[in-house]
Image: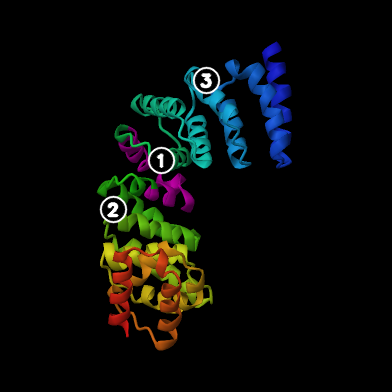
Amino acid sequence: MARAEGVLRLFSHFQRAFAARDSALLLAAAEPLLAQHLHVLRPHEAAIVLNHCAQLKVLDPPLWQKVSDALPEILVDPTCVSLGLLANAFGKASLHHETALSAVVEAALELTTSGVALEGRNIAMLANAVSKLRVRNLALMESLAEQVLTRKPELNAIDLMSVANAYARLSLRSEELFAGLRGPILEAADSFSMQNLGTLAHAYGKLNIRDNPVLAMIAKKLKQECDTGKPMEPDVMSPVVHAFAVRLELPSLDLARCVEFSLPRVVGSMKKYDIVLTVPALPRLAGFQPGPAFLRPVFERCLALLEQLTCNAIVGVLEAAIELQ
């Protein structure tokens, strides 16, 4: 009873601080909670503490280290929800705490190997977090791939994008997984943002998965957005162009029209990375028909960033300029 009253009282203070979106108040509420009750926190309670801290960017090193060190003892009979939240917290905070992540991965593997069915959202959170932190545990990723194919109806657009991107980050190419994701991705087409579509294109390009229905959907949805007057931003355009034109060598008139519309409008905000991925690939973009009004601002931007480019990038830009004139 004393444990319950003490934890509930401090936990309610912590939750109120989070609801107020007050980072300083959240840290102040977390400190006594962890100092007095860390050893008796349940997995879900520890997950909520770290998730709230990650969301409000409360990244106090002693706080995170204290919980990380205690996780192997806290993770007694955890649920898939708790593990998904914990993984998400470390991923969102971009903190690679070996002890904590090993404990989460081992607990997740124990659940999957014992026949426990994980929930779709938690599979996506686990895959996204471990890939973001470059935890390349093949046994876990194989297990998550098997499980996600049985939970497809539970996945929304963000989950689908997260799963595809997770396997691309870790360079894990699974024909069976991506074939299984095709239907849900196509069904969710109207729910993807332009950023989501860019991430999907990057994933398929990096893994060299030439799934024509999915890729055609990506180009079509981007074209529809451009037709409303909304150009692709550089962080969307660069991975899409590189995936279609370079990695997959996949022709798409929809994408060509998107680039013709978008690039002159956003080129002024392009960074070195965007230039390197986009401009040298333009001659390889099937159906691409740039005019003088297109070329001038593009190569003026390249010239402005010239000192930041490597020799190989400069050669690629010059070759593109020659081929496109």
Give the residue at mark 1.
Answer: 127
Is 179 located above or below residue 45 in the figure? below
Q: Is residue 143 magenta?
A: yes
In the depicted view, which residue is nearer to us: 4 or 47? 47
- Amino acid type at image mark 3: Ala
Q: Quadrant of residue 214?
A: bottom left
Kindly state the secondary structure of the residue where label 2 is placed. loop
Rendered-image quadrant of the N terminus: top right
Is 48 located above or below residue 265 in the figure? above
Give the residue at mark 2.
Answer: 207
- Amino acid type at image mark 1: Ala
Q: CA distance from mark 1 to mark 3?
A: 23 Å
Q: Residues within 10 Å of mark 2 (few under 14, many from 20)?
A: many
Kindly state the secondary structure of the residue where label 3 is placed. helix
Q: Which stretch did the figure color magenta? A: 140-165
Q: Residue 79, image x and y in percent? A: 49, 27
Residue drawn at (32%, 56%), measured in percent from left and top? 204
